[in-house]
Amino acid sequence: MTLSVFIWVAVKIFLKIHTNEEFFSSSSFFALQILLRPLKYPLISFVGHVAFYGILPILVAFTFRNFVKAFVNRSVGFALIFALLMVFALDSESRHLASLIPLLLLPLGEVLNSWELKKYQIFSLVGIQLLLSHFYLPINSENILSEMEAANWTGEAAQRYLMNFGAYMSLESYLLWLGISVLAILACYGILKIQSKRKMRFPDGGEQF
């Protein structure tokens, strides 16, 4: 009960700081987006996180059990933040997680460091991350301003920007990033699976894969 109250209050405060209720977002809209958006686009939250953060959510998913241990065992505060992180992870608008992302890098790094990855594996993961960053795709295109002014949010030019936020993906962008997410998962799994042959172990004696 106490944890539920904490999460509710934390969500209210977080949204108050990061949104403008008079313009668009509110805690009610946030709840509806979590509940209803996946009914139209299954796995939209995960797909949105891959589009925004690259392989980070994939690595968290692959290491989840040990990642959770490394995160919550740091302190009670980190345990409460983890609960808040899981709530916002359900939201398809990935940028809402941006303020919390730095906190998960250290425990995730500890888990990955314990795997003793080879250099070529690290370079391969970095290469996939660079590809997913789509830095090579210009956002500003000839028609973006006209589409934005006309509220044509699903237009090709507008989607070059809006596809980076899961909540505003068009069907085409969703299907594109769903396919990219699947390929990225397979690629990361293939790179990390090599480690399973050496029985990856962690400081607490746990194993992954």
Image (cartoon, helix red, strand yellow):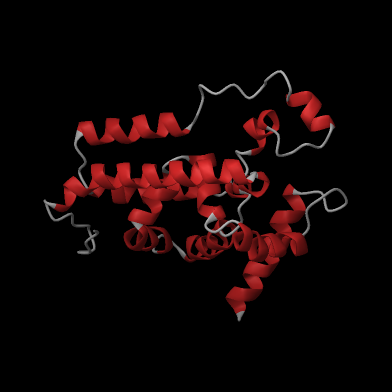
Above or below, 124 against 13 in this view is above
Task: Give the residue at the far top of this rendering.
Answer: 142
Instruction: Please give the name of the residue rendered at 56% of the width and 53% of the height, measured from the top-left corner.
Output: 44
| Spot occupied by residue 160 in the image (x, y as percentages of width and height) | 63, 31
Count of numbered circles on the image:
0
Q: Is 23 situated left or right of 177 in this image?
A: right
Task: Give the residue at the far bottom of this rendering.
Answer: 1
| Spot occupied by residue 45 in the image (x, y as percentages of width and height) | 55, 54
Position of the N terminus by quadrant: bottom right
Task: Give the residue at the far left of this rendering.
Answer: 198
Q: Which of the two residues, 50 or 72, is positioned nearer the viewer here?
A: 50
Above or below, 100 against 83 in this view is above
Instruction: Please give the name of the residue rendered at 51% of the width and 49% of the height, measured from the top-left corner.
Output: 47
Q: Is residue 101 visible?
A: no
| Spot occupied by residue 59 in the image (x, y as percentages of width and height) | 37, 48
Instruction: Please give the name of the residue rendered at 33% of the width and 55% of the height, measured from the top-left corner.
Output: 63
